[in-house]
Image (tube, rainbow, N blue to C red):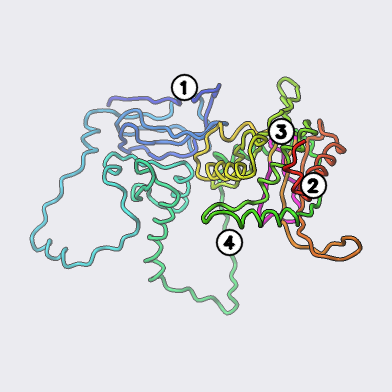
Amino acid sequence: MTRYVFKMPDLGEGTVEAEVVAWHVKVGDLVTEDQVMAEVMTEKAAVEVPAPVTGRVVSITGAPGDMVRVGAELIVFDTESDAEADLAPEPAPRVAPAAVAIAQAAPPPPVTAPAAPAEARKHGRVMASPATRRRAREAGLDLAQVAGSGPSGRITRQDIDAALTGAAAPAAATAPAKRPGATGLARRTGTEEIKVIGVRRIIANRMTDAKRNIPHFAYVEEVDVSELESLRQHLNSRLPPGASSLTYLPFLIAALARVLEDYPQCNAWFDTERNVVVRHRALHAGVATQTPDGLKVPVVRHAEALNLWELSDEIKRVSEAARSGKAGKEALTGSTITVTSLGKLGGIVSTPIINAPEMAIIGVNKAVDRPVVMNGVITVRRIMNLSSSFDHRFVDGYDAAAMIQALKDMLEHPATIFMAG
C-alpha cells in the first residue's frame, strides 16, 4: 500500500486550527483528485477541501464539530495503481434476448429525482455550496443524483427544492392516510440531540461574548411612520414593472447616515486589544439577515454616499448573497453599526444584541395601524417601534436617547432625510 497523508492546510490569517463541519467521504471510499472530501470552518469562513490525489480513503481524523490543528493529519489515502482501476466503470453485463424483451415490456421505474450530469457522476465531483450540502443531508438526498443548473453544473438551492418535490410526489399519491384517534391527541416521546457546529457554533460564541463583555443599554421609541408610509407607497407606485419595491430599511439607513454625523460615538468600534474607541466617519451599515446557516450580517459600505434607490439595491444584493452562501468574508465584516429587522414578524419590542466590536444596533419592529391622540382627537396612525441597544461603557443613556430621538424626527418627517445641511 502506498500511503498519502494529507494534513490540515494553513487557511491563512493566523489560523491555527479549523473545525470539521462535514465529511463527504468515508473510510473505504474511492475518490478522485479534486473531489470535495470535507468541509471545514475557521472563525472567518467555511472552506471546502478537495482531495489532493486519487485513491482509497484509509482513515480520517475528526468527527463533525471536532477541531483539528493546522498541520495535523486529516485524511490518509492508499494511492496504489489498482485504486484507479477500481474507479473505472464496470462493463455492462450481457443480457439474454428474452430478458431484453421482458425489460422492454415492463413499465419504466418512477423517477425520484433528476439525474445528475453524466460527466459529474463519472468524475465523482459534486459542486454545491455548504448550505446546499447541509440542506441535502437534512433531507436525506444524494447530491450525486441531482442535476445542477448553476455554472459548471453547480447544484443550487432551487435544484434541491425541485429534486425534493419530484421525490415526494409519487409517495404522497400512494401513502395511506393516517386515521387519528377519537380525540386526535397522542403522546409524543423521545428527544433529539443536535450538535452545535459550524456557523451556528460561531454565532453562539460571538453572541455569548458580546452579552458577557458588553453592558447593554436598551432604549425603545415609538415612531409615527404615517408620512413615511405615504411616501414609500407613492414612490413604489412609480416603479417600472418588475422592479423591487422600497421597504423601510433604505429610508432608515439614509436617515442614520445623517444622524450619525452628530452622534459619532454610536458609529464606532471598541478595539479591546488596544483599549481604544475607533470612531468612523463612513457609515458601513450591517444588515442582519436570516440565512439557512443562521444569522449573518452582510455590509452595505459607504451608505452615506448612496441615494435611496442605490441603498435599496445594495441591501437586496448583499442580503441575497448572504442567503445563497455567496457572500465571502469581506462582505460579512467591517460594519460600523447594524440594523436588524424581523419584518412582518417584528413584534412590538425586541432587545437586539450588539454586533461586536460595534457600539450600537438598531432593531426595527413591525409597523401597524394604531389609534393615537393628535391635537386632542383620536385618529389612526401608522406606528412602528425602534428597539435599540448601546454599549453603555462608551455611549451614555442621554446620548443614546438623543440619537434615537433625532432618528425618529427624520422618519416622522421624511422630507428632512433628503435636505442638505
- Mark pair 3, 4: CA separation: 44 Å
- In the rendered structure, the answer to whether residue 225 lies left or right of residue 64 reads right
Question: Callout 2 environment at 10 Å: few (<14), some (14 to 19), or many (20+)?
Answer: many
Q: Which tag, 2 or 4, sits closer to the chain's start?
A: 4
Question: Callout 1 environment at 10 Å: few (<14), some (14 to 19), or many (20+)?
Answer: few
Determine whether the residue tagged by mark 3 lies in a helix, strand or loop: loop
Q: Which residue is mark 3?
A: 358
Mark 3 against mark 4, which lies toward the viewer? Answer: 3
Q: Quadrant of residue 303?
A: top right
Q: Residue 64 versus residue 377: which sits nearer the camera?
A: 377
Q: Residue 415 versus residue 132: which sits nearer the camera?
A: 415
Residue at x 38%, y 39% (from the top left corner):
25
Disc number at residue 71?
Answer: 1
Q: Which residue is mark 4?
A: 189
Question: Callout 4 environment at 10 Å: few (<14), some (14 to 19), or many (20+)?
Answer: few
Picture quarter with the C terminus: top right
Determine whether the residue tagged by mark 2 lies in a helix, strand or loop: helix
Residue at x 58%, y 75% (from the top left corner):
184
